[in-house]
Image (spheres, rainbow, N blue to C red):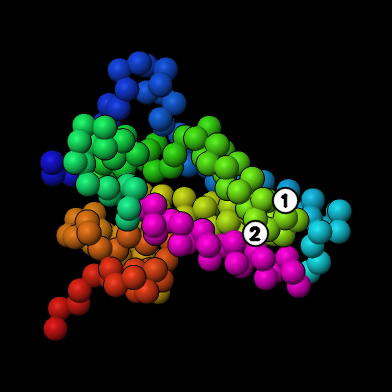
């Protein structure tokens, strides 16, 4: 299907479920920034973090999110629809976005789903890293909030006339030229490392 720059896909026949798939971008960004700040505050308040460890863990969590963003986009959101189940999952999570890339209300997962995923990562990281989780997950959620902001901006606004323009170009290549490349949205770092950078014309 050729991308449609007007309208919105219908994912669920149930009107309540369908409504829950739409969200204003400010809501999830605010939620995850507030949680990130809260985690850092809690870590400092109870002595789990100091300034140096907080900075290091925050940056590590941010970097880890960028990897998860890349892997999820490449291997889950673009999974091969080899059967009806995979086809429905892929379209529900991401295929509808490629069909309607300008639908501003579907540029983020619904907050309920995002909170569930964030809680899952928190408890997994807590089991692995113990009290370091407060700095790691803060950086991880900041990375997610930044991803949401960048993804919204590249679809909703004209590219700026500075170095950030490359993010617009990178994501546009993924949508309109080569969906098997340029999976990174908030950063092309992992595309460069994993060999999925768009090919440059000689």
Q: Can residue 193 be seen in this view?
A: yes
Percent position of residue 98, x then y: 25, 45
Local secondary structure at mark 1: helix
> Of helix, strand and loop, which mostly describes the magenta segment?
helix
Local secondary structure at mark 2: helix
Report the quarter where the N terminus lies.
top left
What residue is drawn where x is 72% and y is 51%?
Answer: 39
- For the record, the magenta segment spans 52-73
Quadrant for residue 5, please give it: top left
Report the quarter where the C terminus lies.
bottom left
The residue beneath circle 1 is: 39
Percent position of residue 108, x then y: 43, 42
**Mark in front: 1 vs 2:** 2
Distance from disc 1 to disc 2, alpha carbons, whole Å, reads 9 Å
Labels in figure, total: 2
What residue is drawn where x is 48% and y is 42%?
Answer: 25
Label 1, residues with CA under 10 Å away: few <14, some 14-19, many ≥20: many
Q: Residue 136 carries which label?
A: 2
| Residue 15 magenta-highlighted | no
Front position in the image: 20 or 62: 62
């Amino acid at each position: 299907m050729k991308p449609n720059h007007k309208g919105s896909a219908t994912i669920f026949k149930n009107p309540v479920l369908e409504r829950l798939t739409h969200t204003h971008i400010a809501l999830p960004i605010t939620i995850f920034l507030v949680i990130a700040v809260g985690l850092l505050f809690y870590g400092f308040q109870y002595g789990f973090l100091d300034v140096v460890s907080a900075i290091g863990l925050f940056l590590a969590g941010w970097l880890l999110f960028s990897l998860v963003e890349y892997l999820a986009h490449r291997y889950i959101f673009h999974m091969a629809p080899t059967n009806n189940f995979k086809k429905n999952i892929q379209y529900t999570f991401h295929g509808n976005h490629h069909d309607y890339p300008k639908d501003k209300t579907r540029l983020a997962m619904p907050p309920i789903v995002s909170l569930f995923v964030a809680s899952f990562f928190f408890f997994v990281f807590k089991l692995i890293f113990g009290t370091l989780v407060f700095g790691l997950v803060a950086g991880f959620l900041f990375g997610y909030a930044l991803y949401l902001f960048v993804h919204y901006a590249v679809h909703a606004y004209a590219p700026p006339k500075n170095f950030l323009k490359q993010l617009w170009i990178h994501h546009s290549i993924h949508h309109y030229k080569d969906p098997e490349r340029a999976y990174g949205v908030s950063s092309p770092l992992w595309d460069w490392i994993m060999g999925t950078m768009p090919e440059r014309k000689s």
